[in-house]
Image (cartoon, rainbow, N blue to C red):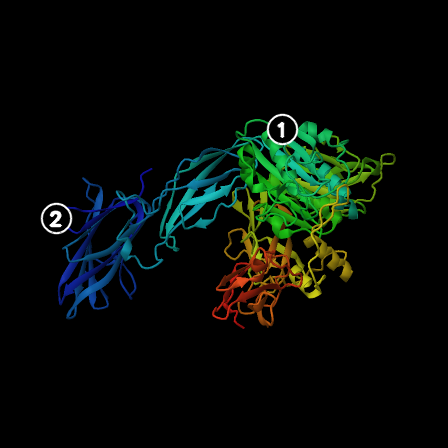
Amino acid sequence: MPQPRITRSTVPATNSYTVSDAKAFVLHFHQDIGAGATKAVNITYGVAAADPILELTLTGNAPINLLTVPPGQEVTVGDFTVGVTVGPPDTDTGTVLVNCRITNQTLGSLGSPWTLRGSRTAPNHWDIRFSDTSALVDYVICDPRAVVQDPGTVLEQDHVTLVADDATGPAAEPTVLGLANLPPNAFTPSYLWHHDADLAILPMDETTDAPTLDVTLPGVYATIAAPLTLTTSFGTDGFLTNVSEPKQLTISHRPQDIVLVLDRSGSMASEDKWTNAVIATRALVHLIADARAGVNDQDRIGIVTFTDPGGWHGLPISDEVEIAMPLTALKDAREAINPLDLGQPADNTNIGDGLVAALDLLADAGPIGDRRFTVVCMTDGLQNAGHYYIGDTVPDNAPPGTVEALTSVTGARKLILAGARMYVIGLGSTIDVELLRKLTDTGFTQVLDPADLPGVFTDMLHFSQEVNRPSPSDKAPEPIPSEAGRVYVRTTDADRVVLSVIAPPTDGTIALDVWDGAEFVQPPFTVPEANVSETDQALSVGAPDKLPEGEVIWRVSLLDKTTGAPKALTPDQVLLYEDLHLKAELTLDEQAYLTGDDMVLTVRIRRDAAPVLGAVVRAELDAPAIGLGEALSAAAVSATPPPATAANPGGRDVPPPAEQRVIDLMRHNGWSRWPRHQAPGLFADGTDLLHDKDGTGDYSNTFSRVFKAGTYGWKVFADGQDPQGNTFDRQLTISTVAAVKVDARTTRVKTERILHHPSGLRATRITITPQDVRHERLGPGHDDAVVFALKDGMFEEIFNHQPAPVFTDGTYQRVILFKANQHPVVAVRAAGTLLRPIDATG
């Protein structure tokens, strides 16, 4: 398809421009016109069924439609008159000539500014020729170029970049001439991508200011063709717009390898954490197997458990890091997980070693090729053992030269670590959220109540397979009557539904019914026998047995095996997911935050390629009521730092000092869990709602009360109607972490002269209490992030050949030693904030 372009005549003594294959153009020029003089501009366009619109505007005045000026008459505009002659169609060239004459009726004008605009409903050929060379053309701009580069065949869940030609066109065929003279932002190019396929691809149908779009492709059950088109525009009024020819994006399924990495340390024995982890693991294996059934027979899932009877040590990794289930084909894993013994909580927490074992499991399973890797890691504590550590700093009690950073792995391990999608679940209040958050830029959740673990753990299915979870309820949608002990779920145009009920088979048998408009009946499609373990039951329906189109109301029951009567069943026992015809995606504008930041939530809702409008999107927030650093500083649990405690061989997961301080603080305050805050009126506008202000299907709002450091757990509920009129509901979760944003103005700095220092030198103690603008303290444990630098003099610990002091009350201290003729100045960078220089002379 020919693209719009502008050509300037190179013929000497001519002043003309040709606009080709464009529906519209804008030409801005300045013209010197003497008293009583006339200057002309001729416009030629192709003959068509309907005349174009040609408008001439003198800046500051109303436009004149040249084709409506009566023959022989003139229109007055400012100090000028405009006359127009429209010639008859030229049968030889198939064109029409419009002669426009501008006459100055006063004493003459220098550089009068004019704009000529032409538009038609279909691409056309335009020639604009001035009567002499005195007309100074500032710019000419026509419809933008719209060409999509062939995306070809790509793999599901890949990150791909869609690429288009620059809207301004190549230098040889530009759509803009005189770019330097354009008014600021008046004709900024924009690009709107669109696809036509029976699945949702996000982000799509969003306007960008660059000719590229980064997207993450969804999972697919079979190879799917998604025709792509691109709408390009100059400006925002839609006058200069172009639409590309479709290009075929083909999405193909690929083999997926998933490894679950489970913390089996001693602390997992408390609060039923390990019991819930086992239940969640079984349910997740069942759900993944059902979600991917029949998609790719090379899909596999494996399980690694980790613990370590020792402390930090050299290689090899402890043999208590076990492959509980090797990478196993999903249909086999679905059965193998039921009797599988995952062991019992044992010793210390070697998270890094567990992850390396997962990388090796994936690497040893064959060439990487097109395989897609997902690693799910769950832990309830801080790392205190093993060979590989997480983070940027060697653990304090690790023997020198014995341990390695997880990021130091090489070969296939490095490739898989870089390419795998990592989902991290932190269980409990004493985890190092900031440390675990470094493992992933994709999925992180903190679970405070172990009983919530199965539901949260299986929400990983949304992350891994990109399916959505409708909201189960013990109430049927109106006007359907509800029955006690039943759970009701609504899906919309699903090809497949996967279901797990957290209940052992001894509690009853799953029954799945659908509403036929009058009553609940057995589905008119095959419902397979449930796969059962001692803790849960799971099944899937649909694809290749296509489910009914539109809205389906499901009734989930647990029936007594003898009487067939329904037994007690609650919504939190029902984990049901549907595939992605209607997709809701919850995102945050940042991966992590600092106190005082704004946090922007966005939910994009699409029904295949179409945005879903008019939905009600409501948010709930579980936020820290007390910041960890502030609480530890206020309590000053111990006046001196606790001694580094080596992991206890054969013991019960001896916590490192940082974790022990949190445990002591919670015990001291009588907290069974960290205090949390759930308040209404979350957002800056005083509501709990996300709004689609632009009518794009993107619902957003801003939370402006990130006041405490810790984990912020969002749960969002969306309900409405899709473009086909089907009712839907969705529940989405996401977690993020906020750290203290140290403020140089409010951070406390104290200097104290020390008399008669044993060194014989002058001495000054510098005490820093880092805090944010609301006086929330950074707290202890951030010694690697509070860095002291000294000009002139010496730090006391250097003089004494000792480690730098560590304090647990939220202060960071150094003693400066100096001679009488020295003038020491201390610089401090606290958690990224440079404080004012400190004069240490006292």
Residue 674 vs residue 608: left or right?
Answer: right
- Residue 155, given in percent of the width and then of the height, sits at 51, 33
Q: Are marks 1 and 2 in contact (CB under 8 Å)?
A: no
Give neighbour class at mark 2: few <14, some 14-19, many 20+ (Cα, 10 Å): few
Amino acid carrying label 1: it is: Gly
Give the labeled residue for mark 1. Answer: 294
For marks 1 and 2, give the CA distance: 70 Å
Find disc 2 in the rendering and name its residue: 12
Q: Is residue 518 visible?
A: no
Horizontal and vertical percent position of residue 456: 69, 46
Residue type at mark 2? Answer: Pro
Figure check: 44 above or below 785: above
- Residue sitting at x 65%, y 61%: 807
Q: Is residue 302 left or right of residue 590?
A: right
Q: Of callouts 1 and 2, which one flags the residue occurring earlier in the amino acid sequence?
A: 2
Which of the 4 image quadrants contains residue 65? bottom left
